[in-house]
Amino acid sequence: MEFSKKISEKLGLDTGYFANNGFWVSLRYLTATILGIATGMVFSRFVEKEVYGNYQLILSFVATVAFTSMPELNKAIWSSTTANKDGDLDTALNKKIKYSFIGSSILILLAIKYYIGGDTLMSLGILLAAAAYPLSSGGDIWSHFLDGKKEYKLSTKLSVLFSIFNKTILIIAAFFYPVAAYVLIAANLLPVAITNFLGLKTAYKKKKNNDTDKDFPKYGWFLVKMGIVRDILLKIDNLIIGIFVGPAELAVYSFASIIPDQVTSFISSLGSTTVPKIGEQKDADVKKKIREKSVLILLMGIALIGVTIILTPLVIQILFTDKYAESIRYSQIITASLIFYAFEVVYSKLFLVKKYTNALIVTNTVIPIFRVVAIVTGFLMFGIVGIVWSNIITRLFNFICYIYLSKTCKTQ
């Protein structure tokens, strides 16, 4: 205890809080990583590139309509729960489920388009995604509610159990029926819908009051509007490759993204533990601590990214076989772009919790639009390689924007 206290004083951080909650968040990340890698190993060995590419394309369609499930309300609920306003969970969930049916309708129309075009298997896969969508996408608020209540232990236990269940179903489907993307879609999204339902039941058991934040409807709707552009454009790279190049090439690109996606998930997971602490402190104090620890954050980022890049060739060849060896270079470039990602995570949490509306407008509109311009320009000039290199340009632009906004914006 005395040692921990000295470390806290030395670093200027509540190391007891971050060590305890960081452990549970890291466990959640570690489980997701292991299961994700295991799933990738099965897919790389038993599922053909064309089938996996179509599977990823359908998931990209789902991600593109995800704005209809109002995922930004997940973030807004953080502000409410840190202020002990649990009643906002009802408002958020009702809106998320209700508007998710719009997303399902869009997917159904897309399925009809593929059916008319003669691709009945893609059509069936999209229809199954539409059926699962309201709960698989709209019902995911439970973990954010529990995290906002500092129930990291419970949230992690549920996430781990649910992830094991969900990935086990998907792995079984990929092993025994790897020839159709629609089977993989069903095995992916339907179990997620079931576990989200169970997670919501648990969240409501932890709901201690019906108090509401008078600013929640306004702030929540503001976040939803700001997130529409970003959510629609989120998978633009996958859509361009899958539609204009082909499913096999999308499969290669998707495998190249597995390792960097794990890195971003790890950093983002640790960043989520800062939310309650940011809510408890003044803006100036939070910014000061970030500045004081900026060199440490940067060095840790460089170390993590460097080790990951060095190990990428070995990891991909051993885990995903030589069939996806061409994704190694892509993966290393995408990973290199994440050196400053920790700053994005911390500052995004600051802007969110402290309600920096001007900063949120920029990060949810200007940054995604810049990313699309970089991706499209890169693709037109250099093909898939151009899309890969656009990650470097985009992340650098993001970093500059977040630093600038942290100095110029404040709570509205």
Image (cartoon, rainbow, N blue to C red):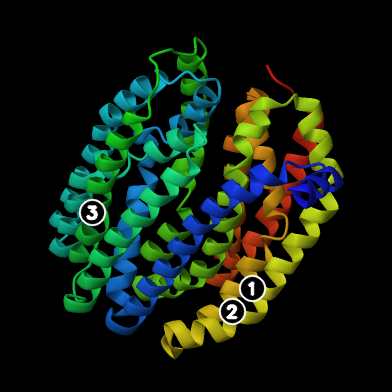
Question: Is 40 placed above or below 13 here?
Answer: below
View extreme (top): residue: 214
Give the residue at the far front of this rendering: 2
Dot 2 crowding, Cα within 10 Å, few <14, some 14–19, many 20+: many
Q: Nearer the viewer, residue 259 or 394?
A: 259
Q: Percent position (x, y) of residue 125?
A: 19, 58
Q: Is residue 41 left or right of residue 305?
A: left
Query: Helix or strand or loop: what does disc 2 sit on?
Result: helix
In the rendered image, which quarter is residue 411 located in?
top right
- Mark 1 and mark 2: span between their CA atoms? 6 Å
Label 2 sits on residue: 312
Q: Residue 222 carries which label?
A: none
Percent position of residue 91, x then y:
36, 20
Point out residue 154 in the picture as x, y percentages from the top left corner. Answer: 42, 44
Reading the image, the residue beneath label 1 is 308
CA neighbours of label 3 inside 10 A, class few (<14), some (14 to 19), many (20+): many
Mark 3 / mark 2, whichever is N-terminal:
3
Name the residue type under label 3.
Answer: Pro
Q: How many marks are shown on the rendered structure?
A: 3
Residue 191, numbered label: 3
Q: Nearer the viewer, mark 3 or mark 2?
A: 3
Residue nearest the viewer, comparing 278 with 348? 278
Say if mark 1 contacts mark 2, CB within 8 Å. Answer: yes
The secondary structure type at the circle numbered 3 is helix
The amino acid marked with disc number 1 is: Thr
